Amino acid sequence: MCEAPIEVVVDRKFPPRPVAAGITGNQVFAEPVNLKLESADGRLFFNMTDDGSLPRIPDGNAGQIDGPLRLEGAPDRRVVYNVFAVAIDGRRKHRARSCA
């Protein structure tokens, strides 16, 4: 017999979506640019691609944003960045322990 506690917490109040500061919509830049993402509440995590493909949805194991993302581009070709960022506030817990 196993007496392992199972705890499940459902948090329906998600933090606000991150916003890109200083950049609106799709833009083309001739020089490197710093992309600043902000969230009113929560830590920011991101996945990014530089080949035009869509990045995976980030989770707590993705890269954490702690400052501007420097988008360098390339001198010999056009680079299309796609950034997917989420705010994770730490309130959501999904933990279960089971016995075999």
Image (cartoon, rainbow, N blue to C red):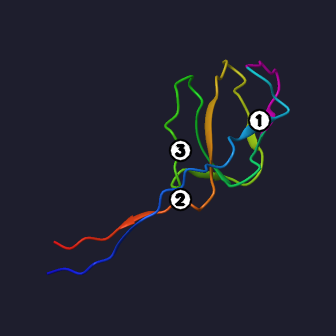
> Furthest residue to the right?
22
Q: Which residues are magenta?
A: 26-35
**Where is residue 8 shown, x and y percent of the image?**
41, 63
Q: Tell me what residue is drawn at x 19 percent, y 80 percent.
A: 2
Q: Amino acid at mark 3?
A: Pro
**Circle 2 is placed at which residue position?**
92
Residue 72 position by quadrant:
top right
Mark 2 closeness class: few <14, some 14–19, many ≥20 residues within 10 Å = some
Nearer the N terminus, badge 1 or badge 3? 1
Q: Tell me what residue is drawn at x 75 percent, y 37 percent.
A: 19
Q: Are marks 2 and 1 in contact (CB under 8 Å)?
A: no
Q: Is residue 27 magenta?
A: yes
Q: Tell me what residue is drawn at x 63 percent, y 34 percent.
A: 83
The circle drawn on residue 73 is none
The circle drawn on residue 58 is 3
- The N terminus sits in image quarter: bottom left
Q: Amino acid at mark 1?
A: Ala
Nearer the N terminus, badge 2 or badge 1? 1
Q: Amino acid at mark 2?
A: Arg
**Circle 1 is placed at which residue position?**
20
